[in-house]
Image (cartoon, rainbow, N blue to C red):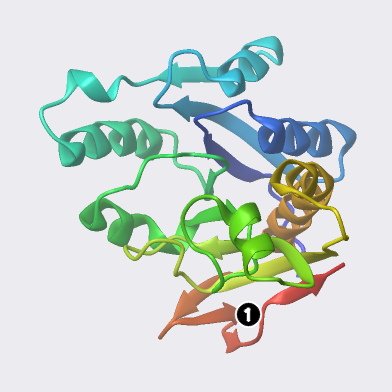
């Protein structure tokens, strides 16, 4: 059942912010019935913060070096996030591994977009790893964030063929538009359904179901 209220979003990003830009475009056009509350980054020069500023969205750099530990940084970050009362926290190119204690408290409302067909290739260098394995297809996944790296229940995936002659750079470039579309469609599902996870499974309106698959 569609929600009459706008979905309240917070985005975490460390890099250029292309997925953030896709979400902003979808909210401006009305495709996503959502409101972007703020963008947080662990890098002062993140392109995502520039995108947020240009759109008059609150952007906040929190310097990890200002804290004695990773856990202290995480607590400070999520204290600010919690004050905004978001419905959904989106890790969109956020390159820090979050503390298990913090993740466990946020897991039902925190998702990540990852450039592989999970469970294949958690972590970094996913495009090259798909090529090295001789895979015929590659893709991206949106999943719930749990304490284990890139291991939360997958909500949705998109797939593209790997072409003869692809290298990591060309594969990443071809995947990116599909990745943007995947994230927008996936966030849209949170307006249409009650989505969560339990016992390692995706739950949609209280029922276990497989991840949505897009091509």
In the orientation shown, which residue stands out farthest toward the left? 68
SS class, disc 1: loop
Q: Residues within 10 Å of mark 1 (few under 14, many from 20)?
A: few
Quadrant containing the C terminus is bottom right
Quarter of image, res 42: top left
Q: Residue at horizontal 88%, vertical 60%?
A: 163
- Left or right: 195 as drawn, with respect to 170: left
x, y percent for residue 18: 71, 32
Q: Residue at horizontal 30%, vertical 19%?
A: 63
- Left or right: 197 as drawn, with respect to 25: left
x, y percent for residue 51: 67, 18
Q: Residue at horizontal 55%, vertical 50%?
A: 125
| Pick the front one: 186 or 98 | 98
Quarter of image, res 55: top right
Q: Residue at horizontal 26%, vertical 39%?
A: 74
x, y percent for residue 202: 56, 79
Image: 11 above or below 101: above
The residue beneath circle 1 is 205
Quadrant containing the N terminus is bottom right
| Pick the front one: 46 or 194 | 46
x, y percent for residue 159: 80, 66
Quarter of image, res 21: top right
- Left or right: 18 as drawn, with respect to 42: right
Image: 5 above or below 207: above
- The answer to whether one can see residue 194 in this image is no
């Amino acid at each position: 059942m569609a929600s009459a209220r706008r979905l309240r979003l917070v985005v975490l990003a460390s890099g250029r912010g292309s997925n953030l830009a896709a979400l902003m475009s979808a909210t401006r056009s009305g495709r996503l019935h959502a409101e972007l509350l703020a963008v947080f980054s662990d890098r002062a020069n993140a392109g995502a913060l520039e995108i947020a500023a240009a759109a008059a969205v609150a952007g906040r750099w929190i310097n990890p070096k200002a804290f004695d530990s990773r856990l202290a940084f995480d607590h400070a970050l999520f204290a600010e996030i919690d004050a905004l009362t978001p419905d959904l926290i989106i890790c969109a190119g956020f390159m820090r591994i979050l503390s298990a204690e913090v993740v466990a408290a946020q897991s039902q409302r925190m998702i990540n977009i990852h450039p592989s067909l999970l469970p294949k290739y958690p972590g970094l260098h996913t495009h090259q790893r798909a090529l090295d394995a001789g895979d015929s297809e590659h893709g991206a996944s949106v999943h719930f964030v749990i304490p284990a790296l890139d291991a939360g229940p997958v909500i949705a995936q998109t797939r593209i063929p790997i072409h003869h002659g692809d290298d990591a750079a060309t594969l990443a470039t071809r995947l990116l538009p599909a990745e943007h579309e995947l994230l927008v469609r996936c966030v849209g599902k949170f307006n249409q359904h009650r989505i969560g996870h339990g016992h390692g499974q995706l739950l949609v309106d209280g029922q276990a179901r497989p991840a949505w698959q897009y091509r």
